[in-house]
Amino acid sequence: MKVVITGLGAYCALGSCVKELWDAIEEGKCGIGPIKRFDTALFDTGIGGVIPGDDNSESDEKRLLSYALKAANEALNNAHISDNSIVSLVLGTSNGIMGRDINEISYNLADELNLGGFIITVSTACTSSSHAIGFAADLLHRGSARVVIAGGADLLTRDVFAGFHSLGLLSKTPCSPFSSSPGTTLGEGAAFLVMESEETSRHRGVHAQALFMGYGISADAFHDTRPDPGGSGISRAIINALGSSGLKPGDIDYINAHGTGTAANDSSEWRGIQSALSDHSNKLPISSSKSYYGHTQGAAGALEAITTITAMQHNVIPPTLNYTRPRPFSPVDPVAGTRPRPYNTRFALSTNSGFGGVNTALVFGRKDEAYKPLSTTQRSLSVVGYGLNLEEDYINRFIPYDDLRSTDMSAKLLAGVVAMILNDAGIEFRSDECDKIGLFVGQDHLSDESLKALDKSISERGIRHLSASAFTRLVINYPAGVCCRLFGFKGPVAAISAKPDSGMAALYLGADNLARRNDTDLMIIASVDDHKHGKDKSAGAVGLLLRAGDERSPIRLTGWSLSRKSDKGTEEALKMDDLKPGNTASGPLISSAGSPGLCALIDTIKNINHTDQNSFLIRSEKDLNYMGIDIIIEKKYQYANRPERKNRNT
Amino acid sequence: MQTDLKGRIEIRESTLLNVLEILISALNMKMQPGDLDPDTPLFGSGLGLDSVDAVVIIVELESRFSLRISEEEGRRALRTVNTIVDLILSKEYAND
């Protein structure tokens, strides 16, 4: 299936629509200036890519929603969408509304737009909206959604500014990626792309603006904030993106780099590009658009995708502004200058990296580019291990405490359940197999513990001296990043939030990813929640391990689907394996651990031998205002003599 | 002369204990001051601290000892606990 992009919408410091943004780039304007919304006198620098607006009393919630609405409305109008009931939303945000459920902004936006499709939120720091674009394509490939609006939104708040300041990452002058003076400049905004299959667009009578070719995700498994200096993470993301698009390194004509401007990011990114594209990288124009509108955090991936696509449409390449002299280990051709360079780009890569050690690469093609989409074969999936962890300190039995000294409860709960799952599966892997192990986590909010630590440090020492270590923990994908580092997982990683059950949404996306792509062999799906809710819900983490193409395993995951009407989704999930409806698993649940659905699934697997039934449907639906998620597991044969697992728990 | 030296040793020892306690509490280390050798490298193969820990240590030292540590001073001092103590003593008793 060809996925096409039919609508674009952007709102940022450089312009309040795509046309304004592009005009500014053509004129060589920079959107970065003094920040007026909050007091920056205490900091060493006071600039940012802040959207002008006088109303300082507006709440963060309203401001963020207004950004998202402006960009989303532009994208929907641009795509000539007349009926929002067929539109699904995949939204990426790093902070959302700080301290609240991360998916709030998505539901607020969907309500305003009366979207009738599925609503999924992805939060992976600065790669959030790139993830969203990739997952939107997955929803289209699966046939779950007809039209998806994908992108992201984030605000530049005082706390985020202070956090980056405390880490010494902010530049005193507008950032100049790959150029001699290191440092980044933060920005804010929203950007959305309307994506659909070529068939749907033809049916609707709208023209494609660009092709979405494919994407790749990887985990660094290196450090919670610092990128792997060798760039192996970004390199794997690029290789996976090329693999999923069916392109070779030589096909890429231009890279819109993450290029934050920091010393750590820029050199590691260039090394990663070099190792993925080898000699081709030396001839390649590579620019960073952050020099125009700053680092727009969770919106960066989508905003930079729009910049890339618009440039492609105008037959030019956007330059890197403010460039003076080359920095060691920086691209050979950073497109220095103030005006776009004429260039006929057929295929472009857009790369991003984020806190928690996560990397993405997206591939876009010209709308008229003739290519044959890769035919994908679906691999069978089996459940090879599972676990439920309710103890914060469980992980200490596996890993010496020193490694976890500055982490929080969410990360410990998740690490505990991952250790439990691997132990249950009896899996030991070589380091070269780690590249193919992924981790998708359902999670709705930040750890309370880290939020409180940040607030405490601000009230005790003032905003300038806030706790840098607490700040680095305040991204939703932090626990997932800690697990990748501890266990060495270097495959795709994501943190997902969706009603009614984020763990089940992670399972849906993770299963689909694993079945259709061959860059991953093993995938851990988990959910974590550190809030204690009352007697029927408790803090904990729950998860399972999926393996692709393992024909011997007794328990298969054979169907997964999303629905807005209860019967339809179940039907679709059943169709995947020609099954008859089984029973919906229910029963006494000992915990929710953030995901009643995953707990029910594990409960079903535990009792699978005590029943003659062979197929089981696990359904998460509470309120079809949101969505229903159906998962089907099947018992291939009775496994009375399950081999004893080697117990590493000593 | 003798008492001067004795005084200096006392000051150094109390500052050392102070710094050890600050490190242990700021970095959430589950150890006692006596467990930490003041000559162990803080980064790399030693205690394995990272750049975020470095920021945390600087901020903590600045607020507990009421002094300002420049980037350059920080880079030079953050090698071992003893080099941190050297920096603090040189700042606190700069006018002696």
Image (cartoon, rainbow, N blue to C red):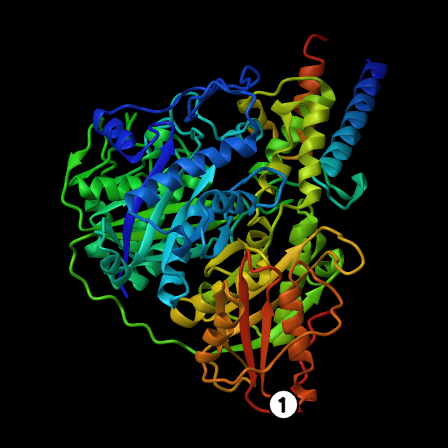
> Which residue sits furthest front?
A82
Q: Where in the figure is residue B8, as x and y percent of width and height?
A: 79, 19
Which chain is disc 1 placed on? A
- What secondary structure is marked by label 1? loop
Q: Residue at x 50, y 55 (%)?
A: A494
Q: Where in the figure is residue A475, as x and y percent of width and height?
A: 56, 44
> Which residue sits furthest right?
B3
Location of residue A443 (image quadrant): bottom right
Location of residue A160 (image quadrant): top right
Is residue A305 something that shows in the picture? no
Q: Residue at x 37, y 33 (%)?
A: A11
Q: Where in the figure is residue A17, as x and y percent of width and height?
A: 32, 33
Q: How many labels sit on residues?
A: 1
**A193 lies above or below A620:** above
- Residue A233 located left or right of residue A456: left
Q: Closer to the camera, A354 or A556?
A: A556
Q: Residue at x 44, y 34 (%)?
A: A67
**A460 lies above or below A143:** above
Which amino acid, mark 1?
Answer: Tyr
- Residue A199 located left or right of residue A453: left
Report the residue marked by disc 1. Answer: A639
Query: Which quadrant of the rendered structure holds the C terminus of chain A?
Result: bottom right
Is residue B59 something that shows in the picture? yes
- Residue A148 located left or right of residue A421: left
- Residue A376 located left or right of residue B2: left
Q: Where in the figure is residue A470, as x and y percent of width and height?
A: 64, 38
